[in-house]
Amino acid sequence: MDISPVATHPQTTQPVKAKRPAASATATLTVAGGLRALEQGTLTCEAWARACLDRIEERNSGVKAWVHVNAEAALAHARTLDRTGRRRMFDGVPLGLKDTIDTADMPTELGDPAIFPGRQPKADAPVVTMARNLGFTILGKNTVSRHAIMLPGPARNPHDLTRTPAASSAGSGAAVADFMTPISVGTQTAGSILRPSAFCGAVGFKPTLDAIPYLGIRTYSRPLDVIGPICRSVEDATLFMHGFTGDPRFDATTPVRSDMRVGVWRTKDFDKADPAALAIFEDNLRKLEAAGATVRSLVMPAIFETIGEAQDVIMAFDLAREYADIKRDHADKCDRELIAYLELGESYSASDYARALDVADACRRAFYDLARDFDVLVMPSTLGEAPEAASTGSSAFIRIWSLLHNPSITLPVSRGPAGLPLGFQVVGCVKEDARLLYWARCIEATLGSTAHMT
């Protein structure tokens, strides 16, 4: 979760310090690729799980993407599937879970090990129950940023260990991008699925609010909290949403097209972005046009200029109340930035909060009126490449969609001047998640993907 107003951070253009070791072919499998191999009999569930666990063993001491690995249980589950046969949609697919999501068989320390050491839930969160029922092999829990908000945590960017993987689904983004698991379940309140995915070079999908039940999970802001997948292809995100919603419109087999109508919203934050990253974004727009897309700029009404301030009020107000007991009982274990943010939230009145909610509602109505003539809206995912690990970067281009509830996805289509991933963000209309994922798959087919690059 992001807790601070939009800010810029200096970008460097130094070359990546060292190339990470290559992963095994099995570890690099996408969800869809692994499922095809399982069905063809060229892969076993145990071999897939073991490849991921071997990669974790090799790399986690540096990347720090996992706080708990349930290796024995994962291998036992995989062996059982190999012995009894696969029957469910995701039987044998390795999965990571953000460590703010309750698990009955593993600790869930909520990104606060000093405050909740060894915290052991009595029951799984509903999304975990669904994952088990769908057949996933759960590998363990992914690292969360400090206090599960926009503060640097222990996880590192797998492409350069001096850089940030962002927050708060930091470990989920890093684990998927480093081939430790093909998919992880993350959460987002402002930018916590999309930004780690963009900085680390994964596909991150933020669904419409309440597409998947947000229960048994650390709560930040009820009007903003969502669950979504971090993976390595749009096909995988589509399969995930099909499995977890049961909605047949999430179909990854529909043939792709290139004659899409693309809207571009160049927000007031464009002038804060790294010029090289913007040049790459504009080049990708030209590639879409050359393939047959119609690309037009979208001019938003004046009310959208205040959308950031409205989101700041909603997030601070809600977090101050969700974290009230922590501030009261564990202030000595809280970062000063957290305390300051909670105090800011306490300063807002219910009237302030209501006015901010009204702004969000007005922007949602205005957005639909303007965007309905487009198939998708696109913009950069971040201001540039991942900054140094002392910062978690800006969510200027991402958090808008958490407030408006629009489904949005980041695609790892490019690398920046330092060789680090740059995301291309694609946005759809509320409750049109399946439609968005179809067009995102079309864009991915045109622009390509760097998700498999070392």
Image (tube, rainbow, N blue to C red):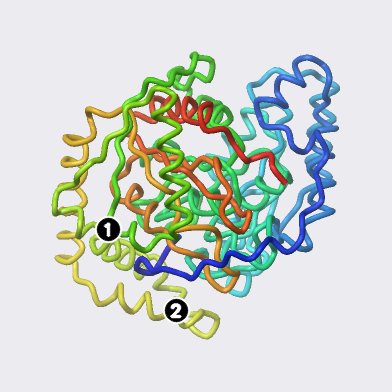
Mark earlier in primary sequence (2, 1): 1
Q: For residue 247, what is the image quadrant?
A: top left
Q: Quadrant of the N terminus?
A: bottom left
Residue 355, image quadrant: bottom left
The residue most toward the bottom is 332
Q: Nearer the viewer, mark 2 or mark 1?
A: 1
- Name the residue that disc number 1 marks: 268
SS at mark 1 in the image: helix
Q: Nearer the viewer, residue 157 or 239?
A: 157
Neighbours of disc 1 within 10 Å: few (<14), some (14-19), many (20+): few
**Camera-nearest residue between 155 and 71:** 155
Q: Is residue 292 above or below residue 94?
A: above
Tell whether 168 sits left or right of 108. left
Which residue occupies 30% across, 49% down? 266
Left or right: 129, with 5 as reference point: right
Q: Which mark is residue 54?
A: none
Q: Which residue is mark 2?
A: 337
Q: CA distance from mark 2 to mark 1?
A: 26 Å
Q: Secondary structure at mark 2?
A: helix
Within 10 angstroms of label 2, few (less than 14), some, or many (20 or more) residues?
A: few
Q: Nearer the viewer, residue 268 or 83?
A: 268
